């Protein structure tokens, strides 16, 4: 199963990029993973929340393919611990999921149309984090999940 972390927003700060490369490198012996940035063209940027969500929706739905299994991250989603993340991944692999997409929406969240496409909605925390930090946290949690599945000593109970 290939994992894609989709994130609406701007490119990473260098320290985030370093962290992502670190965790992606540690995950790759077990599973392929990559970050996909979805950026609204600057000419279309707007302060209108509804318009922004619509533009982001168009980007997301255009990229979403039938073989994608979409998991939306939202602070109101299902709260899973790291072991449950690993169990979710194992279940998806057992089901033959080709590409798992973990979506980090825009600053205003995602549209109802995107929410309807999500197979699951997970919460990292009731706290709100900057999008770039969420990318790094997700990368670490994916690595942690695969370390659990592969009996690596990284995760301590």
Image (spheres, rainbow, N blue to C red):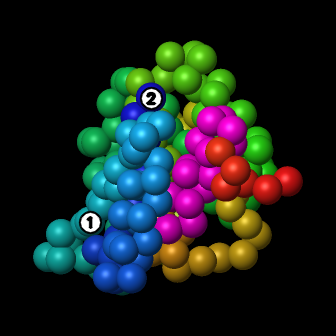
In this view, the residue farthest toward the left is 43
- Residue 63 pos. (x, y %): 28, 42
Magenta span includes 18: no
Q: Specify the farthest residue to the right.
A: 157
| Labels in figure, total | 2
Q: Which residues are magenta?
A: 136-151
* Quadrant that contains the N terminus: top left
* Residue tagged 2: 1
> Dividing the image into 4 quarters, which one contains the C terminus?
bottom right
**Residue name at image x 56 percent, y 60 percent:** 140
Q: Residue at left 65%, top 76%?
A: 128
> In the figure, 110 relative to 12: above or below?
above
Regarding mark 2 in the picture, which secondary structure is present there? loop
Left/right placement of residue 48 relative to residue 59 reads: right
Pick the front one: 130 or 106: 130
| Badge 2 or badge 1: first in the primary sequence | 2
Which picture quadrant has residue 74? bottom right
Q: Identify the residue shown where x is 72% and y is 75%.
A: 127
Residue 126 in the image: state x and y as whole percent. 76, 69
Q: Which residue is mark 1?
A: 39
Quadrant of the rendered image containing residue 15: bottom left
Whether residue 73 is visible, yes or no, is no
- Circles 2 and 1, Cβ within 8 Å, touching? The answer is no
Which mark lies nearer to you, 2 or 1?
Answer: 2
Spatial CA span between label 2 and label 1: 25 Å
The residue lying at 51 percent from left, 75 percent from top is 133
Snapshot quadrant of residue 101: top left
Judged from the image, the secondary structure of the residue bearing numbered disc 1 is loop
Main secondary structure found in the magenta portion = helix
């Amino acid at each position: 199963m290939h994992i894609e972390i989709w994130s609406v927003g701007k490119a990473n700060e260098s320290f985030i990029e370093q962290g992502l490369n670190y965790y992606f490198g540690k995950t790759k012996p077990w599973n392929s993973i990559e970050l996909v940035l979805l950026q609204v063209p600057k000419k279309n940027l707007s302060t209108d929340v509804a318009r922004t969500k619509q533009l982001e929706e168009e980007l997301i739905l255009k990229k979403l393919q039938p073989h994608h299994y979409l998991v939306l991250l939202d602070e109101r989603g299902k709260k899973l611990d790291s072991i449950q993340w690993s169990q979710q991944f194992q279940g998806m692999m057992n089901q033959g999921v080709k590409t798992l997409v973990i979506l980090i929406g825009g600053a205003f969240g995602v549209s109802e149309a995107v929410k309807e496409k999500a197979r699951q909605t997970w919460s990292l925390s009731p706290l709100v984090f900057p999008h770039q930090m969420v990318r790094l946290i997700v990368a670490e949690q994916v690595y942690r999940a695969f370390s659990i599945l592969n009996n690596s000593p990284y995760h301590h109970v």
